[in-house]
């Protein structure tokens, strides 16, 4: 295993033993599990296919460092059908993703962990919002994080120049987070790959390839490690409200 693979694995997979989980849960009346959900899809010529998973894991690790939550390993392949035109992209159906998250939540409840927060790193996982709504209507304790408002707060705190509309894919935010957490995984070229396509009204029908040749929509040239650090810190602060909604603050 190469050095980069070791570092990547350490960033993706929690190192807890079962005794660590037992000790952390002792005296905690309402345990909360945090599940990163990423994707395996193109992110232009300079970011890895696993970018969304790396981002989701970075957010989840920041949360786990600040709150007594049970950090789970990530779901690494999800609904990336809009990126099918690019080599390397792999998807599962929305039905499958829905079923996987449902099964994980049910397994957690059997082990005594009643609340689940899904940390979503891929904007195309629309089904996760439906899953949370359905589960909540059944009285289950589940949340989806971060919300758009959480990202907007983080964008402002980190002084990200690009709006959330423009910063759609492989842009300033994702580049900044990876420059902070996994700089060794960026390839040359992000400094010259800016591309803006704010009008994407037919994205669901036509896919990303109708709007970008490179796979980039955003301004990655504006990314920095400092912005990435502040983005994650802001999201960690915002997570407190999520715990409150679940009754676990």
Image (cartoon, rainbow, N blue to C red):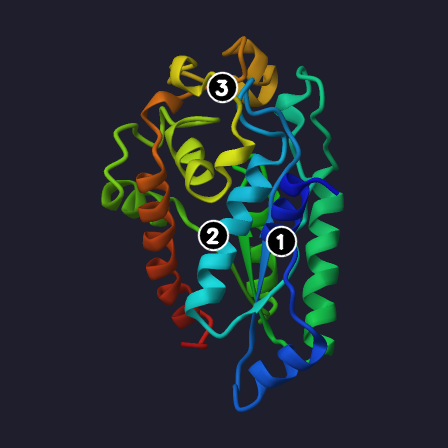
Element type at mark 3: loop
Element type at mark 2: helix
Please determine whether, in this image, residue 64 is positioned above or below residue 179. below
Q: In the rendered view of the protein, which quadrant contains the C terminus?
A: bottom left
Q: In the rendered view of the protein, which quadrant contains the N terminus?
A: top right
* Disc 1 crowd, CA 10 A, few/some/many (<14, 14-19, 20+): few
Say which of 31 and 43 sits in front. 43
Q: Position of residue 173 (x, y in %)?
A: 39, 35
Please determine whether, in this image, residue 224 is positioned above or below residue 36. above
From the viewer's perspective, tell me whether residue 52 is left or right of residue 150: right
Element type at mark 1: helix
Which residue is the site of mark 3? 188
Please determine whether, in this image, residue 204 is positioned above or below residue 91. above
* Disc 2 crowd, CA 10 A, few/some/many (<14, 14-19, 20+): many
Residue at image location 38% in from the left, 59% down from the top: 236
Which residue is the site of mark 1? 10
């Amino acid at each position: 295993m190469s050095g980069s693979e070791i570092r990547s694995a350490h960033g993706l997979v929690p190192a807890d033993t079962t005794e660590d989980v037992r000790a952390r849960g002792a005296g905690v009346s309402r345990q909360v599990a945090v599940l990163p959900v990423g994707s395996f899809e193109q992110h232009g010529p300079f970011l890895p296919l696993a970018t969304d998973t790396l981002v989701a894991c970075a957010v989840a690790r920041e949360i786990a460092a600040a709150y007594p939550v049970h950090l789970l390993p990530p779901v690494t392949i999800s609904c990336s059908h809009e990126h099918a035109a690019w080599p390397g992209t792999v998807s599962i159906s929305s039905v499958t993703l829905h079923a996987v998250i449902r099964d994980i939540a049910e397994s957690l409840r059997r082990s005594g962990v009643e609340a689940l927060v899904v940390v979503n790193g891929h904007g195309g996982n629309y089904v996760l919002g439906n899953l949370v709504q359905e589960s909540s209507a059944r009285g289950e304790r589940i949340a989806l994080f971060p919300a758009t408002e959480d990202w907007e707060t983080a964008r402002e705190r980190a002084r990200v120049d690009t709006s959330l509309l423009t910063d759609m894919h492989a842009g300033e935010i994702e580049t900044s987070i990876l420059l902070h957490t996994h700089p060794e995984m960026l390839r040359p070229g992000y400094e010259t790959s800016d591309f803006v396509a704010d009008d994407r009204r037919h994205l669901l029908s036509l896919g990303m390839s109708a709007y970008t040749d490179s796979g980039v929509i955003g301004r990655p040239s504006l990314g920095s490690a400092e912005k990435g650090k502040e983005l994650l810190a802001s999201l960690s602060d915002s997570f407190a409200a999520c715990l409150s909604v679940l009754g676990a603050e």
